[in-house]
Amino acid sequence: MTAIDILINERFEVDRVLVIAPKRVAEDTWTREHAKWDHLRHLRVSKVLGGPSQRLQALAVDADIYVIGRDNVVWLVEHYRNAWPFDMVVIDELSSFKNPQAKRFRALRKVIPRASRVVGLTGTPSANGLMDLWAEIFLLDRGERLGQTLGAYREKYFRPGARNGYVVFKWEPLAGAREKIEAAISDICVSMSAADYLRLPQRIDNLIPVKLSPQEMKQYKTMENEQLLHIDDEDVVALNAAAVMTKLLQIANGRVYSADGNVVQLHNAKLEALAEIIDTTDSPVLVFYSYKHDLDAIRAAVPTARTLDGPADIVDWNAGRIRALLVHPASVGYGLNLQEGGNVIVWYGLTWSLELYQQANARLYRQGQDKPVIIHHLIAEGTVDEQVMDALRAKNTSQAALMAALKERRTQCGTH
């Protein structure tokens, strides 16, 4: 953003900047970060998010930076056609454009020549091999360095590997191909390791706000209000209070058990956030879920995820063979070593138990971990998640704190 500010206001080289990012990054990073810095607060950022009418309204706003989710790139290109107005394009998570057959790539390549500057950001430019690089670099230089077509790139740097007749399933790089490719793109690529430039803490706690739609929030408030009515200010037993808190946490996660044991779905906001983290994170991800309906929903949304069912799963995790491991915090206990398999944790659903919370985090945040541990917390905004997270951070999860949190929710809901 500092570079964008300099290009707009000091060098006068660009006027309108388009930022393409994953949905959550578009919502919660690019559209908020400038407000944290004195020298960037003057930047006008327009969020081209939401439904078609909301996106059109955002495009009509006079701004410096327009932020859009990558899933709406095709829509944006079709909307402007030959009247493309952005003279600079920033592609956050450039690796999500690595497939030259994908609609988003094919749409973007049509308008890229109209931009005088294109910047791509990614921590995993070739996660699946050197073949990924062609489409990404093409968006930056229009084929100048790695060729105008994927076929030409393959012919120059690869040879057919596994095949069935004329159909090649795998292309293998020729000897010295990596060095030649890196040399060809070195003049437009900068690689920076955070460990080389920053003093990173051993543990990084990241709160990720998850937004519910107005309709979903209304439904949440209705169900929350019904649950809080079970709390009597004059005489509250611990069991009743704990049961209500459990229900509220279920609702915040997006699903809740009805009186007859069926699962009622409220929203998929946390599922979308989790899927995006897994999609954009290079490290294997350890996911802590709270309820069986959470587990079922995550399995359906992330089919490649595995559950921790036995010793073989621990071996596979520590060997790096599991992309996402789904674990209930009560099942990992004391002393279980998972630190060799990854350094990223996601709390899909929070727990009121400080002990469970600390012990679960200690599966990765422990001796033998050679990378900073990143702990993501999915927090449904405006829900009980916020009170539970505050209690965990303050290390105050006593019964008194639980009751205070419930009474605060009652006040907010107007049920006092």
Image (cartoon, rainbow, N blue to C red):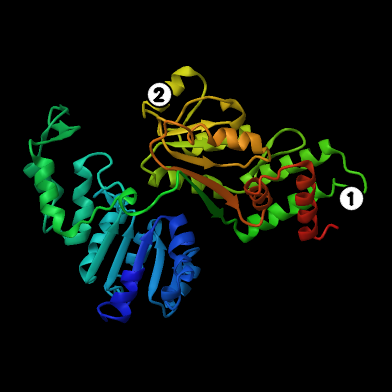
Q: Earlier in the sequence, mark 1 or mark 2?
A: 1
Question: Can I make out residue 132 in this image?
Answer: yes
- Return the residue at label 1: 233
User: Which residue corresponds to the image point at 83% horizontal and 57% vertical from the top-left?
Assistant: 415
* Quarter of the view holding residue 20: bottom left
Tally of marks = 2
Q: Is residue 202 left or right of residue 93?
A: right
Left or right: 326, with 243 as reference point = left
Secondary structure under the numbered disc 2 in the rendered image: helix
Residue 196, compared with residue 288, is above or below; it is: below
Q: For marks 1 and 2, give the CA distance.
A: 50 Å
Q: Amino acid at mark 1?
A: Asp
Residue at 48 percent of width and 66 percent of height: 32
Residue at x-position 51% and y-position 34%: 299
Could you tell me which quadrant the N terminus lies in?
bottom left
Q: Position of residue 86 (x, y in %)?
A: 30, 73
Q: Give the image quarter of residue 408.
A: bottom right
Rendered location of residue 154, percent (x, y): 12, 43
Identified by mark 2, the residue type is Asp
Report x, y in % for residue 402: 76, 45
Task: Answer above or below: position of 298 versus 114.
Answer: above
How crowded pointer 2 is (Cα within 10 Å; few <14, some 14-19, many 20+) is rated as few
Crowd band around label 1 with a 10 angstrom C-alpha radius: few (<14), some (14–19), many (20+): few
The image's mark for residue 194 is: none
Q: Which residue is mark 2?
A: 316
